[in-house]
Amino acid sequence: MEKQELIEKINQVLAEEFEVEQSVITPDADIRETLSLDSLSLVDMVALIEEQFGVKIKGTELSSVKTFGLLYDFVFERM
C-alpha cells in the first residue's frame, strides 16, 4: 500500500468511527483533541488501527504519537 493511500484510509476509518469530518484530520492536528478521545476511546482507536491495518501497537509506543502525521508514519513503518 502506498503511503498516500494509507493516509486516506486511516482518515476515512477514523472519521467514520469517531464521527468527525475528514477535513479536520490533518497531519499537524492533535489526535486526542481532534477526535475528542479519552483514555477509553484511545484504546478503541488503537484496536481499530490494529484490526484495519494488521499492525500491533504497544501502549508505550503510542505515547509519542500525538499528531496524525506521526500516526501515519508509525503505521506505515509497521506494515
Image (tube, rainbow, N blue to C red):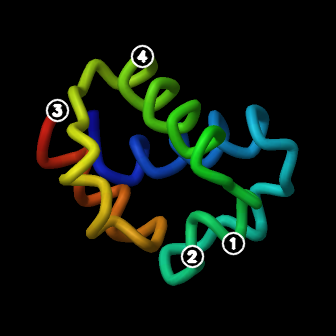
Give the amino acid at mark 3.
Met
Which residue is tagged 4? 51
| SS at mark 1 in the image | helix
State which tag comes first along the sequence, 3 or 4.
Answer: 4
Q: Are marks 4 and 2 in contact (CB under 8 Å)?
A: no
Q: What separation in Å lies between label 3 and label 4 (alpha carbons)?
A: 12 Å
Circle 2/circle 1 CB separation < 8 Å:
yes
Label 3 sits on residue: 79
- Which residue does the image show at 36% across and 58% down from the upper left? 71
Q: Of callouts 3 and 2, which one flags the residue occurring earlier in the amino acid sequence?
A: 2
Q: Residues within 10 Å of mark 2 (few under 14, many from 20)?
A: some
- Along the horizontal axis of the image, is 53 left or right of 25? left
In this view, the mark in front (1 or 3): 1
- Under circle 3, the secondary element is loop
Identity of the residue drawn at 71% across and 68% down: 34
Residue that carries the numbered disc 1 in the rendered image:
33
Measure the C-alpha gap from mark 4 to mark 1: 23 Å
Mark 1 or mark 3, which has the lower sequence index? 1
Q: Is residue 36 above or below residue 13?
A: below
Question: On the rendered image, what quadrant is the C terminus found in?
Answer: top left
> The N terminus appears in which quarter of the rendering?
top left
Q: Residue at x 65, y 40 (%)?
A: 41
